[in-house]
Amino acid sequence: MAKVKSKYVCQNCGYETAGYLGKCPECGTWGSFVEEVSGGSPGGIKQEDLLPDNTPPLRLSEIKMDTEIRVSTGISEFDRVLGGGIVQGSLVLIAGDPGIGKSTILLQTSGELCRQGKNVLYISAEESSSQIKLRAERLGVQSDNLYIYPQTNFELIKKHILEMRPDLVIVDSIQAIYTSMIQSSAGSVSQIRECCNELMGVAKTNNISVIVIGHVTKEGNIAGPKVLEHMVDAVIQFEGDKYKTYRILRSIKNRFGNTSEVGIFEMGAKGLSEVINPSELFLKEYNQTQTPGSTIIVTSEGTRPLLVEIQALVGTTPYPAPRRVSNGVDLSRVLQILAVLEKRIGLNLSKQDVYVNVIGGIDVSEPAADLGIALAIITCVRDVVFDSHTAIVGEIGLSGEIRAVNHIDKRINEAQKLGFKKIIIPYSNEVSEDIKGIEVIKVKKIVDAIFKAVSK
């Protein structure tokens, strides 16, 4: 019998040590070490189970390409994020805050696949069968091809997967599954790593698609070891404000598609519904007679252009140090824009509080939003109204120049489709001759954009 050994594992990064430590030397987290006991037969998938014996290395020219087979989920926004559908034999991780809609969208996906004649096995490790059925009835999901199996023991789960061989397996959630080969509690680093490794082996060797749900920490990171994200084929993040009905499905990693795609959903009484035109959604409350400090930018999420409203508020501060607050954009980016405005056009904001907000709950991370943020701040300071029929796109350099952005034709077409008459873009961007119905204004410096954008 193998000797039983004890070790301490950081639940944040997976760092192992022989004794307990208050602070992890790898990630710096306090109080994250949990004792785990290892011993007995080693777990994991053996190499001989995955490959034939004596498999020689192959030349690149000798490797035969397997045809990539995708299955549509029946939800176009979900298909977009996945890169066109679920790839057979893939392992996908979906993570998000509690109550954001992870189980809902996967139950809806199960219903759509069952309508296509596919067999789906839903492993519920956190809810009973009656609870899943109650949600399914609310969502209108009814099918004899959908099997619900409330279980937390991985050995039993694997047994039923290999017996049924369904087209899709959903595990809700990976943190609640445990294997008897590991002597630690469910949710520990070792348990998550081992169960995910076993699921990957089942998916690859039997050509069964597997989607697992993952929890997130209070910092918003995916719970468990970082190796979990490296093992899976795709990592999908579910984002959204719990006080609003809109949800954003974002691809963080995808071996079979674009890693920057997003899908927009609206949460309702009957589950998640697709938002086909998100730009129109974000501008639904946009007032054509808006107040100073409001601009429209054309951002790009993956290959999809989105029009969102940027609002800025600037006022005299009662405090010794002025406040800088941003919601939806990186604060360091806002501080850089403020520095450029003060240095290049002489806008003194040293005694002003500055607030920047993106309407709609979406996060804008690309630098193409710089010009829109700058013009929102300037119009608020000068108390003038930005032209409501003009959209903006452009990155601001430290010398005040407007730099080129990508996907410019798609951005212009999206603005034209929503009824905008003008769009301000960087001078160095080349525009297709097919662009019609909208005036394209090219600017080199931020000063040029100010004169072009302010309505008379």
Image: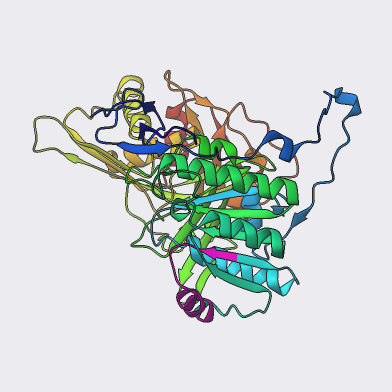
Against 352, residue 456 (above or below) is below
Q: Which residue is at 32% across, 37% downward? A: 35
Q: Which residue is at 68% across, 54% downward? A: 209
Please tell me in which quadrant of the rendered image residue 36 appears: top left
Q: Which residue is at 41% across, 65% downward? A: 245
Across and down, in percent, residue 104 comes to 50, 67
Of the pair 332 and 65, the residue shown nearer to us: 65
Of the pair 14 and 34, the residue shown nearer to us: 34
Question: Which range of residues does the magenta coloring cover?
Answer: 122-137
Of the pair 151 and 241, the residue shown nearer to us: 151
Against 299, residue 406 (above or below) is above
Q: Is residue 393 visible?
A: no
Please tell me in which quadrant of the rendered image residue 232 appears: top right
Against 386, residue 106 (above or below) is below
Q: Which colour scheme appears in the figure?
A: rainbow
Q: Is residue 29 magenta?
A: no
Across and down, in percent, residue 194 comes to 53, 42
Across and down, in percent, residue 29 comes to 29, 32
Against 95, residue 398 (above or below) is above
